Image (cartoon, rainbow, N blue to C red):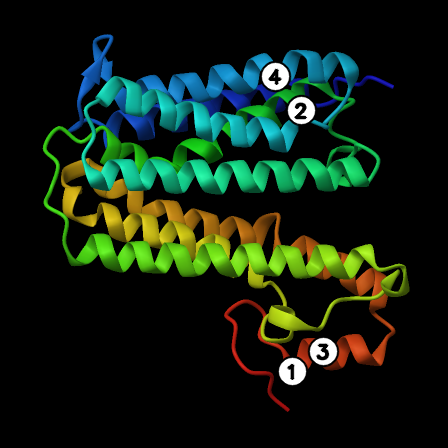
Amino acid sequence: MTTYKNAPRNLIVAAVATGLGMGFAWLAGGNGVHAFGTSVFVVCAAFAFLINWMAFVPAAIAQSDKFYDLTGSITFLSIVGAACWLSAPLDLRAIVLAAMVAIWATRLGLFLFRRIGASGGTDARFEKIKINPPRFFSVWTIQALWTIFTASSAIVVISAADPAPIGVFFWTGSVIWLAAFLIEVIADHQKSVFRADPANADRFITTGLWSWSQHPNYFGEIMMWVGAVVIALPLLSGWSWLVLASPLLIALLLTRVSGINMLDAAGQRKWGDDPDYHAYRHRTSVLIPMPPHA
């Protein structure tokens, strides 16, 4: 049943998110190359919102969230691709960061799309949201804002007016990114294999990377964007230092908002009376992988 409860508040949230995204892009991208009378970063930010607003229309009509995560990945690919096109020719730093974002977005988007397909084409997070068009619209708008903040270091590098020589920050950040990417991929694969086994129905994973961290995939996700920021450091000046907020906001989102908190609450509801579950949580690091302790 469609509802429009709290419509003004939800539309204000969407308006604020749009203002934040465009303002952030205007400040952080001010030193970069320009296109269409403004910075490339502003063009990319506007493109991010446009993509999500266009995807919202059929999703709202069908009251479906099936393509929400896939649209997020498409947004990343689109805005980074647009930045490359508008800023060409690119130096090695820009090419590498663009490739990193493209690889990450493609893998994660396909992984999440397959996962939601396996769950019947719906996500429990959206059950009460997708029937409320204004609220659903605010969620799509916030996704655009998330892509703008997350990809900010890459876009600043790609659209830099004065590229910097390749040096220690490039190689250090690349190693951090690659190691983090492998952690996320391996953790996701291990959990997928675990869930695919009927013998593990209604059980929680405690093996592989998951024996060293309760959320190794989230650790990998956070550290990938730390690596991207490290790569970007030589090009930051003035307001472009705002991109340092990218990994901080990702960490905040995954640890305090929609990641660990939600999963831990669900775990408590499902296994709260299981001594093995409490023992696992006691001996295993919450986020940073480290050997289990007694």
Pick the front one: 120 or 287: 120
Residue 153: tell me if it is visible: no
Badge 4 vs badge 2, beta-carbon distance below 8 Å:
no
Lower position in the chain sequence, tag 3 or tag 4: 4
Cβ atoms at labels 3 and 2 below 8 Å apart: no
Quadrant location, the C terminus = bottom right
| Image quadrant where residue 148 sits | top left
Real-space Cα distance between discs 4 and 2?
15 Å
Within 10 angstroms of label 1, few (less than 14), some, or many (20 or more) residues? some
Check the image and report above or below for 282 versus 258.
below
Disc 2: which residue: 135
**Which numbered disc, 2 or 1, marks the residue that appears first in the sequence?**
2
Q: Is residue 126 visible?
A: yes
Q: Residue at x 78, y 20 (%)?
A: 63
> Where's the N terminus, which quadrant?
top right
Name the residue beneath numbered marker 1.
Answer: 283
Residue 140 is left or right of residue 249, and the answer is right
Residue type at the position of mark 3: Tyr
Q: Is residue 195 above or below residue 62?
A: below
Within 10 Å of disc 2 (Cα), the crowding (few <14, some 14-19, many 20+) is many
As helix, strand or loop, the secondary structure at mark 4 comes to helix
Q: Please name the amino acid that badge 2 sits on.
A: Arg
Q: Percent x, y for residue 173?
A: 29, 55
The residue lying toward the viewer, choosing from 121 and 248, is: 121
- As helix, strand or loop, the secondary structure at mark 2 comes to helix
Say which mark, if any, is on residue 55: 4
Q: Which is more toward the observer, 100 or 122?
A: 100
Q: Residues at badges 3 and 4 in contact (C-beta under 8 Å)?
A: no
Q: Which residue is mark 3?
A: 280
